[in-house]
Amino acid sequence: MSGNYVVPITLRAVVPTSGGTAIFLGHATGGLDKVLMICIDNSIGAAIAMHLGGVTPPRPLTHDLIERMLLAFGARVERVVINDFRDNTYYARLILSEENEVSERKVVELDARPSDSLALALRMKAPMFVARRVWDEVSDAGHLLREMEESGGEGLIPGGMDWPGEAVEGGDDEEEEED
């Protein structure tokens, strides 16, 4: 065992702000009360919010296009792991896989922004995780989310995505990350 554990997460809320969009991520199985907040660009926040709201744009947005490209090549998002937090910046790994009747299963791990990774994971219903070390290191933003919810939640777009937790076998609080 390498000790590289991850915590399954789910999107709890998307909140447009004057300087961008705040996304709130919580434990997927509800086992832990902590909430992470990541500030992202408004355009990606809007794309996530549109997807959550079931809004289909007249033309494909970037993440829609990437999803279509992956599917056209028989690939999919296996999972997303927010794996680091340095200098007030989150980092993520996007794990893709492809398998068909001609070639063996191929897995590719890419460095990616958490915002793009989460947008793709949400579209493709892929599980999302945060490295246990990052989860333990960063501040809990649960109080901010609770304050917004209690004050009427103006601008608050609930995440309410239950499926990432379902992808975690056995519902354990942590899973070992594959290298």
Image (spheres, rainbow, N blue to C red):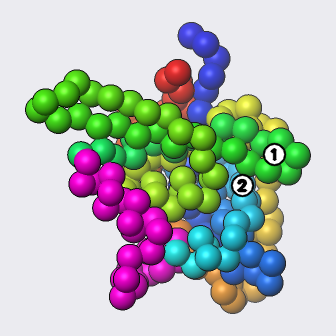
Query: Given the image, on which type of amino acid does mark 1 rest?
Result: Val
Question: Is 147 above or below relative to 8?
Answer: below
Instruction: Classify residue 93 by image quadrant.
Output: top right
Q: State if disc 1 and disc 2 touch (CB < 8 Å).
A: yes
Q: From the viewer's side, name the closer residue of 165 and 46.
A: 46
Residue 104 located left or right of residue 39: left
Majority secondary structure of magenta residues: helix
Q: Name the residue under label 1.
A: 138
Q: From the viewer's side, name the closer residue of 90 and 3.
A: 90
Image: magenta residue range: 48-73
Which SS class for mark 2? strand
Residue 122 appears in the figure: no
How many C-alpha atoms fall within 10 Å of the one at disc 1: few (<14), some, or many (≥20)? some
Question: Is 179 above or below relative to 79?
Answer: above
Residue 95 located left or right of residue 41: left
Q: Residue furthest left?
A: 101
For image coordinates 56% across by 10% down, the residue present is: 1
For image coordinates 64% across by 17% down, the residue present is: 3
For image coordinates 43% across by 33% down, the residue present is: 108
Does the segment drawn in magenta span residue 61? yes
Does the segment drawn in magenta span residue 69? yes
State which tag comes first along the sequence, 2 or 1.
2
Image coordinates of residue 102 in percent, x first then y, are 13, 30
Q: From the viewer's side, name the closer residue of 58 and 151.
A: 58
Q: From the viewer's side, name the closer residue of 107 and 6.
A: 107
Image coordinates of residue 112 in percent, x first then y, are 60, 47
Residue 130: mark in rendering: none
Residue 56 located left or right of residue 161: left
Q: Mark 2 points at which residue?
A: 36
Image coordinates of residue 145 in percent, x first then y, are 73, 69
